[in-house]
Amino acid sequence: MKAAYITQTGTPDVIRFGDLEPPTAGPGQILIRNHAVSVNPIDTYVRSGLVAFELPQPFIPGCDAAGVVESVGDGVEAHSVGDRVWCTNQGLLGRQGTFAEQIAVDAPWCFALPDSVDFATAAANALVGVTAHLGLFRSAAIEPGETVFVIGGTGGVGAMVVQLAKAAGASVITTAGSDAKCERARELGADHVINYSTQSIAEGVKAIAPKGVNLFWETRRMPDFDEAIDLMAPRGRMVLMAGRDSRPEFPVGPFYVKECSLHGFAMFKATPLEMRRCAEDMNRWMASGKLKANIAQTLPLSEAAEAHRMQEAENVGGKIVLTV
């Protein structure tokens, strides 16, 4: 089978594209014929060695995939040959990745794909959608009528936070850096968009939500906790999903006096059951059109190295999908 793979960590140039032995579905696994995969920042961290995992050799990068079940291993009852499925959280913690024509995945990590949802949409929404769902519902317990503020509403996770928060009945404020991205954020469902290249984020949020926001979702590497806590309502929640190496100052007094809470999480540590709960909601909202893919670029799988270069440039403006 054709696959994108590495034999050592490094720059995108270490990614090769060629033939590897196809996998087989072992006990508890399903074999998927991929139709689409997508690129995530974590893929580039693993490939570069920035995030160190023990990797199979050769190692196929990639967390997300969508395709059709070709065979099932012993003990699998939830999936059958011919089923349309999607998966995420592969290529991590010693698991083989998804950038290949065929992948063997433990069945609990795989979810049914509604007939009305195309493979590219499912692959693009997989990791980022599960991340947004975990943060909004498991961590922050968002409620209808609350106000959510997310930095970067057209980014990979930000676009999912905007849509899932709206689907849950929240009012959504977000930011973008250009008029075109502001318009895209509105198309995704944001009620208010602040153009941070021309307007102060803090002033904009205070004008829209003078009593504060119930949830502040931070996507930047260096959080400004003084600003965030000032913008949060009493008992506001803040979600962190970036800033691995940052060590900012933290205003303890204002934080606890306001009875705020801080939630940090890594999506890849979620259990299959937790992810299945996310997938059930995502499938329903994808099928109804409430959850759309924010695809910026589509390339063939053979261009995996170029896709990693584009991802690391950090100006893609959405998801990169590779067709298989």
Image (spheres, rainbow, N blue to C red):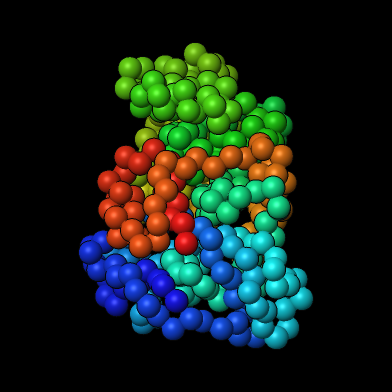
Residue lying at the far right of the rendered structure: 77
In the rendered view, tell whether residue 63 sits above or below residue 167.
Answer: below
141 or 71: which is nearer to us?
71
Residue at 29% across, 70% down: 16
In the rendered view, tell whether residue 280 sits above or below residue 57.
Answer: above
176 or 213: which is nearer to us?
176
Query: Quadrant where the N terminus lies?
Result: bottom left
Q: Is residue 259 visible?
A: no
Q: On the rendered structure, is 284 left or right of 64?
A: right
Residue at 37% across, 69% down: 4
Residue at 61% across, 43% down: 136
In the rendered view, tell whether residue 299 sits above or below residue 27.
Answer: above
In the rendered view, tell whether residue 165 sits above or below residue 107.
Answer: above
Res 144 → quadrant: top right
Q: Position of residue 118 (x, y in %)?
A: 61, 50
Q: Position of residue 268 (x, y in %)?
A: 51, 62
Q: Is residue 72 visible?
A: yes
Residue at 53% across, 60% down: 35
